[in-house]
């Protein structure tokens, strides 16, 4: 059975943006989308934007194609700078060490300094072709002793994918 191509307009927009792509750029902001969350960084090109919050466990809070955010966030929490339950807040992308059995408390909560504490942040690379923001956690002392995360968020000119290391 032939089915109509419903995503053709999106494909045309993506191809057009790839042919005429805007330089990759990074902007530092004090509050993300006028929410109580910030400060942070917005990495973008013509196709995507990536919102990163160093003070919220170094997490990516928004990955947008146009205006559509592909990452979950809790709408009721956007005006709360410190949520009632910090472990269950915000959404976005959290990176937990595995296996969970190696945590000093293997059930809950996850290692605090890796998922919730502020990360140091710096723009590691910025050119017309790509931009990279580096976020570094404190050394975890409790849940996964001695472990530190370093996250690199990169957006490229004229490319839909981004890289997270």
Image: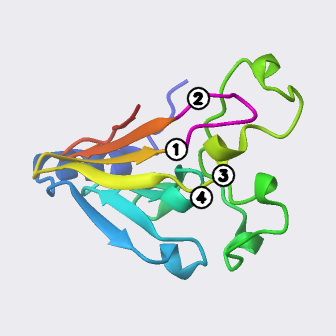
Picture quarter containing residue 89?
Answer: bottom right
Residue of label 2: 147
Gap in angstroms between the C-alphas marked 1 and 3: 9 Å
Gap in angstroms between the C-alphas marked 3 and 2: 14 Å
Q: Is residue 123 above or below residue 31?
A: above
- Please name which of the two marks, 1 or 3, marks the residue nearer to the observer: 1
Q: Residue at x 61, y 36 (%)?
A: 95
Residue of label 4: 56
- How many C-alpha atoms fall within 10 Å of the one at disc 2: few (<14), some, or many (≥20)? some
Q: Is residue 37 left or right of residue 154?
A: right
- How many C-alpha atoms fall within 10 Å of the one at disc 4: few (<14), some, or many (≥20)? many
Q: Is residue 117 above or below residue 140?
A: below
- Magenta segment boundaries in residue numbering: 137-148
Residue of label 1: 137
- How many C-alpha atoms fall within 10 Å of the one at disc 1: few (<14), some, or many (≥20)? many
Where does the image place residue 132, in percent across and percent down from the top left? 28, 46
Q: Specify whether residue 144 is painted magenta.
A: yes
Q: Residue at x 75, y 33 (%)?
A: 143
Q: Residue at x 46, y 56 (%)?
A: 52
**Mark 3: secondary structure:** loop
The quadrant in which the N terminus is found is top right
The tag on residue 116 is 3
- Please name which of the two marks, 3 or 2, marks the residue nearer to the observer: 2
Q: Earlier in the sequence, mark 4 or mark 3?
A: 4
Q: Earlier in the sequence, mark 3 or mark 2?
A: 3
Q: Is residue 55 left or right of residue 133?
A: right
């Amino acid at each position: 059975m032939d089915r109509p191509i419903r995503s053709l307009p999106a494909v045309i927009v993506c191809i057009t943006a790839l042919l005429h792509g805007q330089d990759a750029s990074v902007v530092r902001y004090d509050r993300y989308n006028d929410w109580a969350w910030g400060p942070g960084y917005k990495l973008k090109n013509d196709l995507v934007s990536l919102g990163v919050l160093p003070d919220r466990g170094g997490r990516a809070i928004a990955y947008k194609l146009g205006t559509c955010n592909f990452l979950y966030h809790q709408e009721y929490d956007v005006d709360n700078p410190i949520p009632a339950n910090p472990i269950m807040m915000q959404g976005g992308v959290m990176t937990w060490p595995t296996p969970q059995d190696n945590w000093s408390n293997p059930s809950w909560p996850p290692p605090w300094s890796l998922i919730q504490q502020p990360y140091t942040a710096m723009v590691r690379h910025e050119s017309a072709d790509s931009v990279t923001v580096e976020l570094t956690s404190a050394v975890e002392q409790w849940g996964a002793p001695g472990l530190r995360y370093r996250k690199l968020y990169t957006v490229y000119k004229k490319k839909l994918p981004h890289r997270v290391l």
